[in-house]
Image: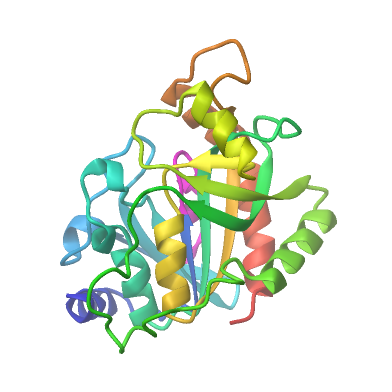
Amino acid sequence: MIEEAKGIVEGLTPLRPEVGVVLGSGLGAFADELAERVDIPYVQIPGWPVSTAVGHAGKLAIGKLGELTVAAMAGRAHLYEGYTPAQVVFGTRVLGALGVRSMVYTNAAGGINLRLERGGLVLIADHINLQGVNPLVGPNDDALGPRFPDMSDAYSHAYRQIAKLVAAELFIPITEGVYAAMLGPSYETPAEIRYLRAIGADVVGMSTVLEAIAANHLGMKVLGISCVTNMAAGILPQKIHHEEVLEAGVMVRDTLVRFLKALLPRLEA
């Protein structure tokens, strides 16, 4: 199915992407910045899961950012939508088949670390997988990667250093932190947030981790960027609503687009 999807995409555009970007909830505006862009709705690609989450456009945009060819996934699949781990990482695997060697994952996340503020950007330094599944479970496809891939540099240290330099040049405040992935779709309880803080998590969300595992399995270099769209449960005396996640995405949209446009050409596979 991966090869079939690859063939469809290659038949719709002559461009061959070098870098892939996954755009999380409310963060899809970057895709519209690509020149010579071809938008391919996920429904047109065999095997590609359709995005059902609010704030996910559900299309693959391939275009140029200067001399760099970029594939931007405007929307992703989540386990909480009922998709399997293999479906969640299907897009990453297709991009790998297309020749992408560098992946940038963005997401909307809840802030656990009390030093974080709504609208802030966090480079993912590491993750904690609490989703209860792994996309590599089952027979290993040796054509994709090794049976036991190393995850000690799952989020490239070199890419994070480049990202920090670019952020400093653009005067964009940015920090590093650990991302905890939960199954969802319910938001975490205050007790769960206290637990996550105790085990070292700085931000929490419902995506990215399975995709990062699949990308590392493929030998890709990965950068993760979380947008703190809300403070996690129990930190502020208020309830959490998805609307505020989307609102924060709008709030940080221009900053993220400016950041990605400067950053992506600096990443080397």
The colour scheme applied to this rendered structure is: rainbow
Q: Is residue 77 above or below residue 248?
A: below
Image quadrant containing the N terminus: bottom left
Image quadrant containing the C terminus: bottom right
Name the spot of residue 38 as percent of width and height, x first.
Answer: 35, 65
Residue at 69% across / 35% down in the picture? 113
Instruction: Examine the structure image and report whether residue 266 is included in the region drawn in magenta.
Output: no
> Is residue 8 shown to the viewer in this render?
yes
Q: Is residue 200 above or below residue 88?
A: above
Left or right of 58: which side holds 220? right
Q: How many marks?
A: 0
Q: Image quarter for residue 56?
A: top left
Name the spot of residue 65 as percent of width and height, x first.
Answer: 56, 68
Q: Image quarter for residue 60?
A: bottom left
Left or right of 3: which side holds 113? right
Name the spot of residue 126 as percent of width and height, x first.
Answer: 60, 58
The magenta-colored residue range is 23-35
Q: Is residue 135 above or below residue 245?
A: below
